[in-house]
Image: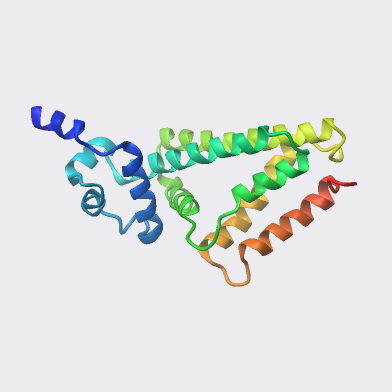
Amino acid sequence: MAGAARARRNAPPREEVLAAAMEMIAERGLEKLTMAALGREVGMSSGHLLYYFGSKDELLLRTLEWSESRLGAERGRLLTRTAPARERLDAYVDLYVPDGHRDPHWTLWLEVWNRSLNADEDGRDRQAAIEGAWHRDLAALVAEGVSRGEFRPVDADRFAARLRALLDGFSIHVAIGLRGTDREQILGHVREFLDESLGRADA
């Protein structure tokens, strides 16, 4: 017990472990990630990593939650600044869409979705909590734009659900490197959709 306590005191910061896991999952996928390799990367034994996380699926979820907490803070800064609703909506979309093929954050999501069929209730609830935060922020922004007369009248909740489905589909194409789809093309499609659905910001 004394040895385990000493190891925990000397463990690297949690963020270092999760950042390393995110990078290795993006490079290799969860199936090829081993606790031994991750342990070598951060200077911990595979046994201690299993002690902290219990399983690779739990490591994946915690890594996604950590990554999402960082994105959530950035999303909050973008959406609460003083700017027209459309400008903030474009910033939301820009943050949502992956940077390119094998984007680390989106690789985590693809791995989580791939395991969703066999996920337990806790895993599903945690995933839903992450999805819900993105949805609530988007619906609130759309409702604000409608109330200020910047957007055409729409049901904000329904519009947010449809827009996120559109973004998810396009983002998967970018993240897996589907030929004929790149980030700039996708952003152009989404801007066009928003112009047609909500009206131009300068209209």
- Is any part of residue 1 visible from this angle? no
Residue farthest bottom in this picture:
179
Residue displayed at 32% across by 37% down: 14
Residue displayed at 20% across by 44% down: 44
Does residue 18 appear to the left or right of 168 in the view shown?
Answer: left
Image coordinates of residue 172 in percent, x first then y, are: 56, 58
Residue displayed at 86% across by 47% down: 199
Image coordinates of residue 153 in percent, x first then y, are: 86, 37
Does residue 9 appear to the left or right of 68 in the view shown?
Answer: left
Foreground pick, 129 / 186: 186
Image coordinates of residue 166 in percent, x first then y, are: 67, 52
Quadrant occupied by the N terminus? top left
Q: Is residue 66 above or below residue 172?
A: above
The quarter holding residue 189 reads bottom right
Residue displayed at 40% across by 37% down: 120
Foreground pick, 128 / 14: 14
- Is any part of residue 82 visible from this angle? yes
Does residue 47 appear to the left or right of 149 in the view shown?
Answer: left
Does residue 6 appear to the left or right of 161 in the view shown?
Answer: left
Q: Which color scheme does this rendered protein use?
A: rainbow
The quarter holding residue 184 reads bottom right
Residue farthest right in this picture:
203
